[in-house]
Amino acid sequence: MIFMEAQEKKEIDLIDIIQVIFNYIRKFFLYVKDVCVWLVRFLFQAKWFLIIAVACGIAFSFYASRKSNLFYKGEVEMRFNIYDAYFYKNLTNFLNVYLKEENRASLVQTLQISPEVAANLALIDSYFFIDNSTGVLEVDYANKFETQKDTTIRRINDRLMLVVVSRDTTIYPDLLGKIKYFFENNPTVLEENAIRLQQIDQKIGMLNNEIVLLDSLRKKEYFKKETGSQAKLDQTILLSEKERRLYHNDILGLEYTIQGLQWEKTMKSDGVRFLTPFRVDPVPVNRLSRMLIKYVPVVFILGFFIALGWKYRKKMYQFLSEKE
């Protein structure tokens, strides 16, 4: 009997809990319904505020995307023979600070460009490449690597994507050379690159000496007369023809290494390499569709809060006027 009463009590408690949960859910949906009804009524009452705000946003979007003010984005991949991507990222940021601060004179002096070219520039920035272990590199435009917790994603340190936004698309070929000159003539880059090229020359010299030595040994071994079944060469006893060392493959390997070093010295003689010219997107970055998406929601929200403040202006004034 006691067990049955306890069982019934548990069932009643469970039913009460379910009823409480459903009551909260019902109240929540009723509250959401009331909010939606209030919002619809308020939007209708504030329609003129909102219409004017949206009209202003559309007008500003047309103004920002006018033909004489269209900007185009150019991209080029650059790779480094000296230092890593972080070093050149800082150099790029150095240039972009001039644009942000409207310091065109310093930009003209730093890049050795004309004031007209500097006036057309809107952005000089660079972005890292990342690899998510698939073998396909992607440009980290959104800087998601900084907040990425996936340890399989790694940042590539030997290249950057250089991005320049300009009003005039004809400046890109000449600007590429100016930026390259700026990077390569950094005192640190100049010094380290000179040391790198000098070390390549030293390696080539050492390998050539090794080839001369091996070739000399090969000639002695093959052309020196032997007596009996044994021949003495530089205190080394050659017991038979099979035990003779063939230097041909060794020399070929050294020559192949020298060719690689000579290729590196020729093709990678500078601190920075640009793989292609600027790839310019023919679609403007501030085209009308993008400007509408950017500005209309902003002015709509701004108009909403202005209308809200206007509706409750008396209550706000009363609240602010009350003394503690």
Image (tube, rainbow, N blue to C red):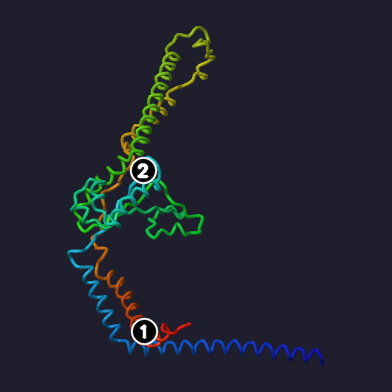
Q: Dot 1: what SS?
A: helix
Q: Mark 1 Cα within 10 Å, few/some/many (few <14, many 20+)?
A: some
Measured as percent of width and height from the top left, residue 45 is found at 33, 90
Q: Amino acid at mark 1?
A: Leu
Task: In this rendered view, identify the residue nearer to me: 51 or 290.
Answer: 51
Image location (x, y in percent) of residue 261: 37, 32
Displayed quadrant of residue 210: top left
| Circle 1/circle 2 CB separation < 8 Å | no
Q: Amino acid at mark 2?
A: Phe
Q: Provide the residue designation for mark 2.
A: 80
* Upstream in sequence: badge 1 or badge 2: 2
Q: Does 275 appear above or below 141?
A: above
Q: Please determine whether, in this image, residue 285 is positioned above or below residue 91.
A: below
Q: For the residues marked 1 and 2, what is the alpha-carbon distance in whole angstroms?
A: 55 Å
181, 318: nearer the viewer:
318
Residue denoted by label 1 = 308
Q: Residue furthest right?
A: 1
Q: Nearer the viewer, residue 129 or 323?
A: 323
